[in-house]
Amino acid sequence: MPFFADRATFLACVQDHFHRQDEPVLGDEPAAIAADRLAAVVERHALTNGTVAVLVSHGRIMASFLARVSQSDPWATWQSLTMPDSYVVEPGPTARVTRVPAR
């Protein structure tokens, strides 16, 4: 991850990361591949265990995955994340994403 001298440059680079999901913009892994990797873990866990898993991720991977599951824009999803933030993801053909309210 490169150093960004100002917030505007950082935000422009993150936005580019989500708009060019098949290319490595920040680091070596494209956003689409990172989302695929996380989705495979969630699906494998659900199929194997049938239970809830707790996954921890940084914002860009989380946003890519959540946007894919909820069929929403990953840039808008990333912008909506708070710290800390948590979601319940019910995988499957009719996957659902629900934000867990902060306490």
Image (spheres, rainbow, N blue to C red):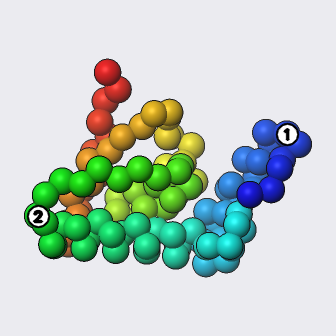
Q: Which residue is mark 2?
A: 50
Q: Residue at x 61, y 73 (%)?
A: 30
Residue 41 in which image quadrant: bottom left
Circle nearer the N terminus (1, 2): 1
In the rendered image, residue 35, in percent from the top left (x then y), is placed at 46, 68
Q: Residue at x 24, y 54 (%)?
A: 53
Q: From this viewpoint, is residue 88 visible?
A: yes
- The kind of residue tagged 2 is Gly
Between label 1 and label 2, give the one nearer the viewer: 2
Residue 71 in which image quadrant: bottom left
The residue tagged with tag 1: helix, strand or loop?
loop
In the rendered image, residue 18, in percent from the top left (x then y), is placed at 61, 62
The answer to which of 101 and 46 lies nearer the viewer is 46
Quarter of the image for the N terminus: give it.
bottom right
Q: Which residue is mark 1?
A: 6
Furthest-left residue in this view: 50
The answer to which of 12 and 6 lies nearer the viewer is 6
- The kind of residue tagged 1 is Asp
Furthest-top residue in this view: 103
Q: From this viewpoint, is residue 76 visible?
A: no
- State if disc 2 and disc 1 touch (CB < 8 Å): no
